[in-house]
């Protein structure tokens, strides 16, 4: 049987790779024997998948679809040196979590932060007050800054949308 191949394909970030196993319905005894031999060879080699389907991430939840624009302006990010320090909400700051500081939004609010220069966005949870730097709209964690591509410059012009809160 020809055309049977294994595949080492890796999905794109955020996607899922689904292996589809083919079922063959032979029409003769010869084809049945050939299919069984091919299946045995594939199983012996650890390869049984014959087709791969890449599945894109699910669409944004309805709550995100109805996000409300709350402003745009400069953003900065917290220094990793503040890891473990208490935030205004009382929790310890973790630079690897998707969190942010805003002057007025309630703690727990979910805000989509979009970098205007590259269009990348991330949803953060408000857990602190600030920023206290004049003219800054929001301070985000290192993880959030990295997600939207602002680590190198340390700041970016962003758009904020209230997702939930």
Image (cartoon, rainbow, N blue to C red):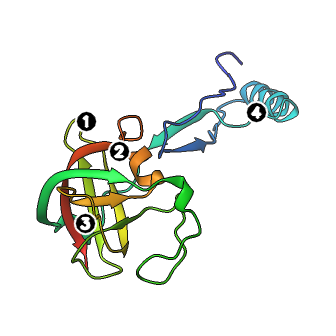
Residue drawn where x is 27% and y is 56% of the image: 113
The front one of 59 and 71 is 71
- Label 2 Cα crowd, 10 Å radius (few <14 / some 14-19 / many 20+): many
Query: Where residue 64 is drawn, which disc sits there?
Result: 3
Q: Position of residue 35 (x, y in %)?
A: 74, 30
Q: CA distance from mark 1 to mark 3?
A: 20 Å
For disc 1, the marked residue is 118
When the figure is inspected, residue 114 is found, relative to residue 30, above or below; the finding is below
The front one of 135 and 6 is 135
Residue drawn where x is 19% and y is 63% of the image: 161
Q: Does any portion of residue 72 appear in the rendered image?
A: yes
Q: Does any portion of residue 96 appear in the rendered image?
A: no
User: In what element is the residue under mark 1?
Assistant: loop
Earlier residue among tags 2 and 3: 3
Q: Position of residue 9 (x, y in %)?
A: 60, 29
Residue drawn where x is 16% and y is 68% of the image: 66
Earlier residue among tags 1 and 3: 3
Earlier residue among tags 2 and 4: 4
| Front disc: 2 or 3 | 2
In which quadrant of the rendered image does the C terminus lie?
bottom left
Q: Position of residue 36 (x, y in %)?
A: 80, 33
Q: Quadrant of residue 17?
A: top right
For disc 2, the marked residue is 148
């Amino acid at each position: 049987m020809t055309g049977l191949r294994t595949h080492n394909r890796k999905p794109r970030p955020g996607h899922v790779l689904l292996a589809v196993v083919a079922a063959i319905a032979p029409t003769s005894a010869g084809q049945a024997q050939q299919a069984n031999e091919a299946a045995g060879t594939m199983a012996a080699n650890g390869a049984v998948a014959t087709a791969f389907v890449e599945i894109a991430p699910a669409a944004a939840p309805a709550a995100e679809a109805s996000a409300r624009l709350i402003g745009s302006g400069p953003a900065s990010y917290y220094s990793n040196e503040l890891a473990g320090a208490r935030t205004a909400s009382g929790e310890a700051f973790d630079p690897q979590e998707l969190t942010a500081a805003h002057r007025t939004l309630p703690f727990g609010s979910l805000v989509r932060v979009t970098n205007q220069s590259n269009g990348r966005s991330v949803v953060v949870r408000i857990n602190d007050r600030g920023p206290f730097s004049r003219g800054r709209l929001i301070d985000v964690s290192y993880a959030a800054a990295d997600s939207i591509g602002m680590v190198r410059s340390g700041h970016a012009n962003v758009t904020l949308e209230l997702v939930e809160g």
